[in-house]
Image (tube, grey):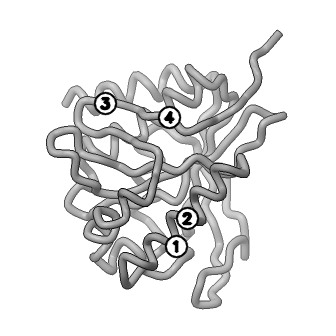
Amino acid sequence: MTPAFAPKPVVLNGRTVRLEPLERRHADGIFAASRDPEIWRWMLVAQPTSVAEVERWIDAAVAGVAAGTEVAFATVLEADGRVVGSTRYIDIRRPNRGLEIGWTWIEPRFQRTAVNTEAKFLMLRHAFEELGAVRVQLKTDERNARSRAAIARIGASFEGILRKYQARFDGYVRNTAMFSITAEEWPAAKAKLEAMLAR
């Protein structure tokens, strides 16, 4: 009998980065890491303007974790324990053994570095090898060329554009580019990610 597909809060340790269950104790670090407006250019929510706003955002994420709808992480540097971003498992579809990696942002200086690559690697490895996922999806604003290239670079397949799929905080309804990796594709994607990290 196949074990239940049940994503739960967990610490995922890498060499460069550690993903910790997101908690209020991360609020100051999250706020400090989130100051660059470019982080929020393509996000569905507005840039937080205070630690109090970050705390409310974390509280909503924690409520989602309690409800079983998501698993939220703080992205933390192994070297010094500094928070540099956040990411989540969302759209958890237990009967179908699938989920999405989303709500991902990272301090700009760590984009296109081992920090971002290893965070994705840790989440994908946990999803496929520990949880037994058969599909992990990722999506981004159709207009976000950098994010689309980064998702493709880790081995995800482009599946198409979901038109008028998600409303932003400012009322704009975006087209969303959808990507996925399946369990059968994971070994090749894993090898690709390991080679990227080795460099």
In three-dimensional space, the C-alpha distance between marks 3 and 1, rounded to whole angstroms, equals 28 Å
> Mark 4 sits on what residue?
10
In three-dimensional space, the C-alpha distance between marks 2 and 3, rounded to whole angstroms, equals 26 Å
In the rendered structure, which disc, 2 or 4, sits on the residue that comes first in sequence? 4
What's the amino acid at mark 2?
Asp
Instruction: Residue 59: give its label.
Output: 2
Asked if the residue at tag 4 contacts the one at tag 1, i.e. Cβ–Cβ closer than 8 Å, the answer is no
In the rendered structure, which disc, 1 or 4, sits on the residue that comes first in sequence? 4
Q: Is residue 9 left or right of residue 174?
A: left
Taking the image as drawn, is residue 158 in sight?
no
Q: Nearer the viewer, mark 2 or mark 4?
A: 2
Asked if the residue at tag 2 contacts the one at tag 1, i.e. Cβ–Cβ closer than 8 Å, the answer is yes
Q: Quadrant of residue 35?
A: bottom left
Asked if the residue at tag 1 contacts the one at tag 3, i.e. Cβ–Cβ closer than 8 Å, the answer is no
In three-dimensional space, the C-alpha distance between marks 2 and 4, rounded to whole angstroms, equals 18 Å
Q: Is residue 166 left or right of residue 96?
A: left
**Considering the numbered disc 3 on the image, is that residue within a helix, a strand or a loop?**
loop
In the rendered structure, which disc, 2 or 3, sits on the residue that comes first in sequence? 3
Asked if the residue at tag 3 contacts the one at tag 4, i.e. Cβ–Cβ closer than 8 Å, the answer is no
What's the amino acid at mark 4?
Val
Residue nearer the viewer, 117 or 82: 82
> Mark 1 sits on what residue?
56
> Mark 3 sits on what residue?
14
Give the percent coordinates (x, y) of residue 178: 63, 55
Residue at position x 23%, y 36% in the image: 16
Image label count: 4
Give the percent coordinates (x, y) of residue 122: 42, 33
**Considering the numbered disc 1 on the image, is that residue within a helix, a strand or a loop?**
helix
